[in-house]
Image (spheres, helix red, strand yellow):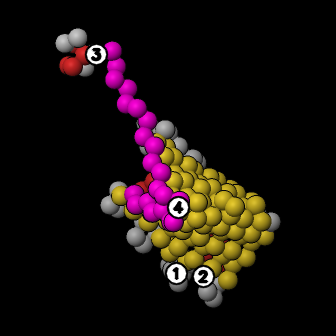
Amino acid sequence: MRLLPADLFVLALLLPLPALALPTDREQPVQVSANSARFNEKTGIATYTGAVVIKQGTLEIRAEEIVVKVDKDGVITTTEARGAPARYQQQPDPKKGLVTAEAARIDYDAANEVITLNGNARLRQDGSSFAGNTITYNSLRQQVDARGEGANRVQLVFPAQARGNKPREKDKKN
């Protein structure tokens, strides 16, 4: 099936993060607002600029500029969100809270299902957080890598685990 330019433009609006999304997110309408939008059918590049907001279900992306690249079949290959900072949020699981991320640039490589946060990167969920110059999340491997730069070291915060009402073994002896 050959897609028409209008179809490619609509497809370029979608930022598919299937490994990070609730199943119902994909069924929701995509809402985009920006000061300007441009799609070049020849290059497969869609560019949205000026206070860009994209929403679909629990997914919300806010940036000054978002560039989406699609292949000749209209399949999204990469997205780049830039801002001061660019922000991303989505609920991956109904039993967990929102994942929020921010960085000067947020890149998504669809083929490898990798999200990279570059420049003062922060990633948070349910009280846990990662901060560093670069944070990469590979959803296929379910792996997070964080790197600092110079004096800006990687910072990790993990909430204390709920212990319930049971005393620990060592507490029982006292």
Q: Within 10 angstroms of label 1, few (less than 14), some, or many (20 or more) residues?
A: few
Cα–Cα gap, marks 3 and 4:
42 Å
- Does the segment drawn in magenta span residue 162? yes
> Which residue in the structure is indicated by mark 1?
71
Q: Secondary structure at mark 4?
A: loop
- Does the segment drawn in magenta span residue 118? no
Among the two numbered marks 1 and 4 on one chain, the one whose residue lies closer to the N terminus:
1
**Residue 124 numbered mark, or none:** none
Q: Within 10 angstroms of label 3, few (less than 14), some, or many (20 or more) residues?
A: few
Label 1–label 4 contact, CB within 8 A: no
Q: Position of residue 80 (x, y in %)?
A: 59, 70
Q: Position of residue 61 (x, y in %)?
A: 63, 56
**Residue 44 numbered mark, or none:** 2
Among the two numbered marks 2 and 3 on one chain, the one whose residue lies closer to the N terminus:
2
> Which residue in the structure is indicated by mark 3?
166
| Magenta-colored span | 144-165
Label 2–label 1 contact, CB within 8 A: yes
Among the two numbered marks 3 and 4 on one chain, the one whose residue lies closer to the N terminus:
4
Q: Given the image, on which type of amino acid does mark 2 rest?
A: Gly
Among the two numbered marks 2 and 4 on one chain, the one whose residue lies closer to the N terminus:
2
> Which residue in the structure is indicated by mark 4?
151
Relative placement, left or right, of 166 versus 150 is left
